[in-house]
Amino acid sequence: MLVSEVVDPGGLATLARQIDEWLASIMATADHVVAIDRGTSDGTSAGDPRWYVRMRGEEKEFTTVWLTLGQRTLRYETYVMPAPEEQSELLYEQLLRRNERLVGAHFSIGAEDAVFLRGDLPLVALSEAELDRVIGTLYATVEQTFRTLLRIGFASRFG
């Protein structure tokens, strides 16, 4: 039994090049994608390769999806909104109920209690189609939920 499927450094370099190519293709064909950039998870050459895909939205002005390539998975995440100022129980209930319907992603609470949408994809399943699906899922989910979540977590501001 394999405990994990670790990709060696050469394999990771190959995957990183493929991701660069796939993202360039997405940038060339998707009008709402406004920027794609690459760095590392810790800002040094020793960190895991990391990309961001910034997209213009209708409900939320911009959504940025971060992709981090590890030895076993591609981790993806996007910031949805700051911590709710009010009705936090109702907001968290909404997030949990929405998690029930999501495939390959889940809402979570991150730094400073902000709301994020996150997921992981095993590297053995990584393909251009899966990368496109992941980015599309996060983007669509933020677009579908953002306004409702803001109206719950910041109700008094919407009077």
Image (cartoon, rainbow, N blue to C red):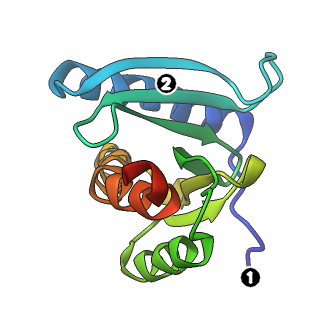
Q: Residues within 10 Å of mark 1 (few under 14, many from 20)?
A: few
Where residue 144 appears, as percent x and y from the top left, is: 27, 58
Q: Residue 16 versus residue 117: which sits nearer the camera?
A: 117
Dot 1 or dot 2: first in sequence order is 1
- In the orientation shown, which residue stands out farthest toward the front? 159
Q: What residue type is labelled 2?
A: Arg
Q: Is residue 13 visible?
A: no
Question: What x and y, as percent, mark residue 115?
Answer: 59, 55
- Residue topped by disc 1: 1
Gap between marks 1 and 2, in whole Å? 30 Å
Q: Say which quadrant the C terminus sits in.
A: bottom left
SS under mark 1: loop
Identify the secondary structure beneath mark 2.
Answer: helix
Q: Name the residue under label 2.
A: 17
**Quick check: 92 left or right of 100?**
right
Residue found 42% across the figure and 29% down from its top: 53
Q: In which quarter of the image is residue 97?
A: bottom left
Q: Which residue is drawn at 75% across and 48% down?
A: 111
Up the image or down, 145 lies above or below 71; here it is: below
Location of residue 98 with respect to 19 vertically, above or below: below
Picture disc at residue 67: none
Towards the viewer: 96 or 148 = 148
Above or below: residue 151 compared with residue 102: above
Q: In the displayed structure, does residue 130 sit left or right of residue 125?
A: left
> Residue drawn 52% across and 67% down?
106
Q: Mark 1, mark 2: which one is toward the viewer? A: 2
Give the residue type that dot 1 points to. Answer: Met
| Quarter of the picture holding the N terminus | bottom right
Front residue of this view, candidates 80 and 123? 80
- Decide if residue 154 is on the left or right side of residue 140: right
